Amino acid sequence: MSIDWDNLEGNVSVKEPSSPREARRLIEEQLRGIKAIERQLADRNITDKKGRRLSNTKYHRWRRNALRALSAYQIALRYYRAWLNKELARREALRFDVNPENCDDLLAASYNLLREWAHEVQVMPEEAALLDVVRTYLTGMDYLPEQVNRSS
């Protein structure tokens, strides 16, 4: 992917991936673009289309545009990575019948997990108190099943 100083406007559009596979492909594409720009930024002898070295003014314009393009690729990369992480977490949560968009569902699932762990390890009094506070909140919100209310 050759970058010349005439066409660097940083027009990297971010589109929502349709699947984790596509997100991974887009992440790789962004990484390749970033590496290409970084490789060219490392070369001080940038030439124009006719093979002539750029003047200082043109070089600084090219560099500014290259840095804008680099920023756009980095922004897109962060977006795709965040999207992928969120999607994988959402899919994992759905395996456990938890709605990842609902804070109370997540809190109840987290409480249940911590409660299970508390039976396996030595819990300090402060940690047990925190579990009690969370259980009280969730019970008051009718978010814990009856068997969980009685067993903890």
Image (cartoon, rainbow, N blue to C red):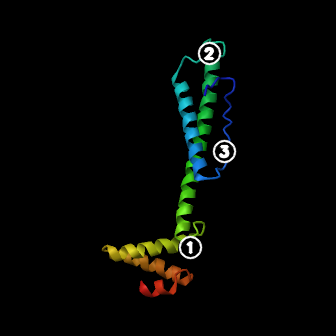
Cα distance in 3D space between marks 2 and 3: 31 Å
**Disc 3 packing (10 Å; few <14; some 14–19; many ≥20):** some
**Residue 111: x and y, percent?**
46, 74
Does residue 74 appear anywhere in the picture?
A: yes
Instruction: Name which residue lies at 55% across and 49% down.
Output: 81
Q: Earlier in the sequence, mark 2 or mark 1?
A: 2
Q: Disc 3 vs disc 1: Cβ atoms closer than 8 Å? A: no
Q: Secondary structure at mark 1?
A: helix
Quarter placement of the N terminus: top right
Q: Rounded to the nearest whole Å, what is the CA distance between mark 3 and mark 1?
A: 31 Å
- Estimate the x, y position of residue 37 in percent, counting from the top left: 57, 30
Q: Quadrant of residue 5?
A: top right
Dots 2, 1 in contact, CB < 8 A: no
Query: Does 12 sit above or below residue 45?
Result: below
Q: Is residue 127 left or right of residue 51?
A: left
Q: Which residue is mark 2?
A: 54
Q: Position of residue 68 (x, y in %)?
A: 62, 33
- The residue wearing badge 1 is 104
Q: Secondary structure at mark 3?
A: loop
Residue nearer the viewer, 136 or 144: 144
Say left or right for 16 vs 74: right
Depth check, mark 3 against mark 1: the one in front is 3
The numbered dot on residue 30 is: none
Query: Residue placed at 66% from the left, 38% from the top?
Result: 12
Q: Earlier in the sequence, mark 2 or mark 3?
A: 3
Q: Which residue is mark 3?
A: 14
Q: Quadrant location of residue 6?
A: top right
Label 1 is placed on what type of residue? Asp
**133 horizontally vs 85: left or right:** left
Q: Tell whether 51 sits left or right of 125.
A: right
Amino acid beneath label 3: Val
Q: Is residue 90 above or below residue 117?
A: above
